[in-house]
Image (cartoon, rainbow, N blue to C red):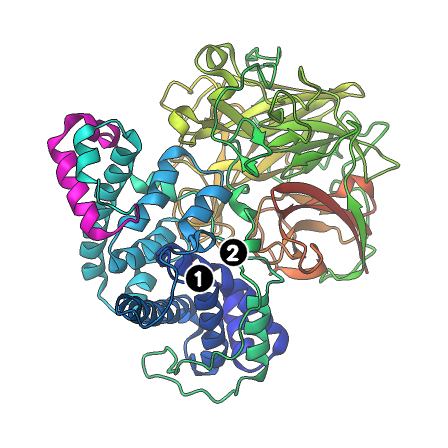
Amino acid sequence: MSSELDDDLVVAARGGDPAARQELAARCLPLVYTVVGRAAERDLDVDDIVQETMVDLMTGLPGLREPGRLRSWVVTVALRRLADARGAAREQRLARAGGLTELSERPDPASDFSGLVILRQALTREQRDVAEATRWLDPANRDLLSLWWLEIGGHLTRGEVAAAVGRPASHVAVQVQRMREQLDTSRRVVAGLRGGDCAVLADVTESWDGEPDPLWRKRIARHLQSCPACAEGGRRLIAPERLLAGLPLLVPPPGSATLAAATTASGTAKTSGAASTSGGANIGHAATGVRAGTSLLKFALPAVAAIGLTAGVVACRPDQGGPTEAAPPPVAVVTPSTRTTTEAPKPSPTPTGTATTAPATKAPKSTGFVYPAPGDRAEAAGRLPARATKSENLGQQKTNLGTNIIRDLGFSGVVSGQSLWTYGDTILDKEINGIKPMAYDAVALGIQDDPSKINFKNLGGFGQPDNWVPLTARENATGGVSRFAMGGTNVIEYAPGQGLVYYLKNDRQGGVNRLLGAGVARVKADKTGATATRTRPVHSANTGEDKDTLLWGPDDPWYGDIGITYDPRDKKVYAYGNGPDKGIYLARVPAARADDVTAYEYWDESRKAWYTGLRKVGEKQAIFGLYENYGQSNAFWSNHYNAWMYVTSGDFLGKTIAVRTAPKLEGPWTRLTKVSDACPAGDGACYAVAPHPEYDETGRTVLVSYTQVAGDKMTLHLRRVTFE
């Protein structure tokens, strides 16, 4: 919410613009939902607290003087409402103890937010232990953990956390350290109780009612300190930063009653709120007459839990409604690909010239699909800025397998006239021996005269799509698909029949997903399917055991993870990728030397210049900021506008399709402009909005796909956007 676009949105919403207020409410809701849900005790109604917070925010918005302080103010209001709810719950408990009211002795299990997170997100055992351990924290530390969790995930800064709790950043650092110590103790308690075979511990907990609380945490912790057997399970704890950083905001249904109530209240709120001198907003607690009629948690989606997991599961069990922990099935779910050779690099010429001096050579032309490229048209038919005149819903993408395929992502590119569609986790929605076979990534062929259908040609032993980017012989010998997974994005063709795909390598050993770095694979295709062969780098920046296959290490930006683009004028691949720091980063390389890390140049947005040699990058070097790009996608040449176009989601809920344009791949890029809706309202969360321009080389229309999450199913849907 810190970008210029978001500041403009806040100003418009503050001024009473109904559409802006509704969009701002949609953007704030996941943050509020996550803060409250992760901090609230089991006997608190998360739905009610979130709803009342949203009403407070929309009512008090006119008094927010500084748009840049929106996030810290949102968190402050949420914590205030949480404190009120705790006070009311405390009074109820006291009244119950005095026999004045008849309340249930146990909290409603459906209201257990930590339990919901454990059930609905694909968490490793260590991550589940952290979620379980939050129940054992003191209330103040639960609040602080909720904020720190958002900080390490890049959703809040330390300054915003400090502003939200009203303490200097130095004091917050001390409090975070104390909270982490209590969290580690709680994680050891969870591990010790899971053991369950210590007679002394059984005696210690004989009178315990099973509900976590600080007193029992201290008692059990004292026993663990004196019992080597019980302490063994929690002896080697993985740092919580590594476990929590990859978890997304928890997203309630976009069409939920809570959001509707908040936006309804915002539409009727007075626009003369009193402003505070500190830049926040002075608000009393808004009237709570607007209440949700149904429980938000009953409809809470796993939503973007699947987004960040490039390959975190091996199978989905239908009785559990979501991905299981990575573990080998009774029989091999995916037959390892035979394409496990590592190709030695071919000699490549040293590039000459730049985009402005090299002669323009058009992309390879062949029968079948043609991917648009600069030089296809002398004059543009359209006039910038890009605007859409129509958006057609083409429905769910169909396959040739005769059963539903649960899959996420969905990029495409052209090699040898074939449209290659690439996916992330791809699951056959058919139970075999109690499991649903899957691939960690997959490739399919598009059909030129039917954009709504694709054909999977590479199949595994159970008829499921096979893994595409293969494992090496060493990886197969040290864990295979139960441990390693590759995740590729879109393909490009840089010479006739010669393609590239960039991928991330994931290591799931011990139930913890670790990104080991990014690499490049060579791609070939024909009408029978596509193959990917991982290259052996000429030079690599990876200093570990993967230096013979990966170009970069885990601490470098994951170039290619967002998407890649080929410019035939300078014969270079432009690779956009997420980074360990906030933002999206850009690198480029002569396509023929893509397997040599020393040939890469890197873009510095702060200097508007390219530089050579890897260096530590920060937010200033990012070509797109954290809140300026939503999801993975790739830039392509629009023949309609004779400009580069980037299609992505216009908001992090994935409800809209937006575009930006630029004369060069390094920019300057225009701000995102909405051109269409994506998911129909109320039909679940959406993500991975991606373009497929090969279906109309003129660029007048662009086929766009997006992944929709409803319940435990991920399905790919299509729209055709027509530009004026």
- In the image, 221 versus 414, the foreground residue is 221
The question of residue 236 being in magenta is answered with yes
Chain part drawn in magenta: 210-237
Q: From the viewer's perspective, is 443 left or right of 288?
A: right
Near mark 2 (Cα within 10 A), the count class, few <14, some 14-19 or many ≥20, is some
Picture layout, residue 269 above or below residue 255: below
Q: Quadrant of the C terminus?
A: bottom right
Q: From the viewer's perspective, is 429 left or right of 13?
A: right
- In the image, 279 versus 399, the foreground residue is 399
Q: Residue at x 49, y 65 (%)?
A: 28
Which residue does the numbered mark 2 point to in the structure image?
297
Q: Is residue 41 visible?
A: yes
**Dominant secondary structure of the magenta stretch?**
helix
Which residue does the numbered mark 1 point to in the structure image?
46
Q: Are marks 1 and 2 in contact (CB under 8 Å)?
A: yes
Near mark 1 (Cα within 10 A), the count class, few <14, some 14-19 or many ≥20, is many
Measured as percent of width and height from the top left, residue 400 is found at: 80, 28
Measured as percent of width and height from the top left, residue 657 is found at: 68, 55
Measured as percent of width and height from the top left, residue 523 is found at: 66, 22
Q: Secondary structure at mark 1?
A: helix
Instruction: Give the residue type at disc 1.
Output: Val
- In the image, 361 versus 712, the foreground residue is 712
